[in-house]
Image (tube, rainbow, N blue to C red):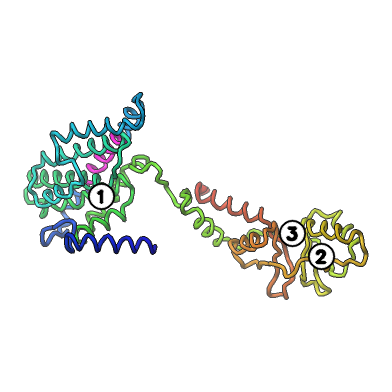
Amino acid sequence: MIPCFLASITSYSVFAAIFGQGLAFNTPAGLEFHRVAELPLYLIFAIVCSVVGYLYVLVFYGLRDRLFRKLPIPNAVKPAIGGLMLGVVALWLPHTMSGGYGWIQLAIDRKMTAGLLLILCFGKIVATSCTISSGGSGGVFAPSLFVGAMLGGAFGTLCEQLFPGAIEHPEAFVLVGMGSFFAGVARVPLTAMLMVCEMSGSYGLLVPLMLVSIINMALLSSRWTLYEEQVTALVDSPAHQGDFIVDVLEQMHVREVMDSKRHLDLVPENMPLPQVLQLVATSKNVYFPVVDTKGIMVGIFSLRDLRTALTGYRNDSLILATDFASSPVLTVTPEDDLHKALRRLTQKNIDEVPVIDAEDGGRIIAILSRRDVNTAYHNRVTELQHPVSEQV
């Protein structure tokens, strides 16, 4: 976050020093949404945005998959072919070059005809696709705003011509189109709405902007997006995988996972080594808690610790269980969450951790294994990814 803040402050300071403090677009005074009767027109506009958004993504990746990838030429040459195609488009439509913010301002000022706005809308789609789909360098944010603005300007102008007096501000569709179109093709409704409102300096059109953005996203399938690597949920995102694991484990507790019926081989602290060997030989456990005369755990040893004891002392009756048991012991309680239990397991790289009853003087009641935690996590993630339908 700190580098992001420093970069934002620096970039804004440089921009303000050169161009002065201001907004990206100048909007007419009083450009706000007041008339509920205009909502049906915004609903129609949402459908139009989804259709054009579908065509945008179709052309964007269609040129890449069906044209440029199949060209039998080196990849380094393909951007040159795309640049040539862009130059041909720019000969007739120079408006499609660069970011196009100036043309968006003209659309807001209503200085362009509906026909030109529609031509620029589809011309920008072709120009952007030729540039990026061929392997050239460029982004999709500004072109998406341009396409949405031109589409909104054309729709608002046509509505004013076909239904005189039906809309108060035809130029409002330019701003709504900018945000809602990008929200649909990029599947980022909140980001698009906030950025457009900040760029125009007005939240007066937030209601239609939200309406068109959400409907546009709902109509466009999740596969029709400009970002192929975009995932549908945080659980599928490698960047958030660690956070998701912590969140899931924190929602589950030791009492839900521990096997209270599992037999525990409690070893008295004064048990000689030969008896310990006899106990271990008939046991299926790997870890053995060592307890005092009151049943309170004072240590724990594993098969590895036992092998170490045999290496150093052999089968000596003078060696007691407490001599080779590890102490103090990392433990958890039934009320602890699984994230804490996992930290205990990884802290000393052990496979099992004792579960004690804190209200009963620390008496051991079960042993929680790493496999139990992993199984519980896997089952919970599976439930979240594939919810079981409600039983009838």
Q: Which residue is drawn at 73% across and 66% down?
A: 365
| Nearer-N-terminus badge (2/3) | 3
What residue is pinned by disc 2?
324
What residue is pinned by disc 1?
180
- Helix, strand, or loop for circle 2? helix
Which SS does the magenta portion mostly show? helix
The mark tally for this picture is 3
Quarter of the view holding residue 55:
top left
Q: Distance between the residues labelled 2 and 1?
A: 68 Å
Q: Relative to 136, does residue 29 appear above or below in the rendering? A: below
Q: Relative to 179, does residue 128 appear above or below in the rendering? A: above
Q: Answer whether residue 45 is magenta in the image.
A: yes
Question: Is disc 2 surrounded by few (<14), some (14 to 19) or many (20+) residues within 10 Å?
Answer: some
Residue 312: x, y in percent? 86, 60
Quarter of the view holding residue 306:
bottom right
Q: Distance between the residues labelled 1 and 3?
A: 58 Å
Q: Write down the region rendered in magenta.
A: 43-60
Marks 1/3 in contact by CB < 8 Å: the verdict is no
What residue is pinned by disc 3?
261
| Nearer-N-terminus badge (1/3) | 1
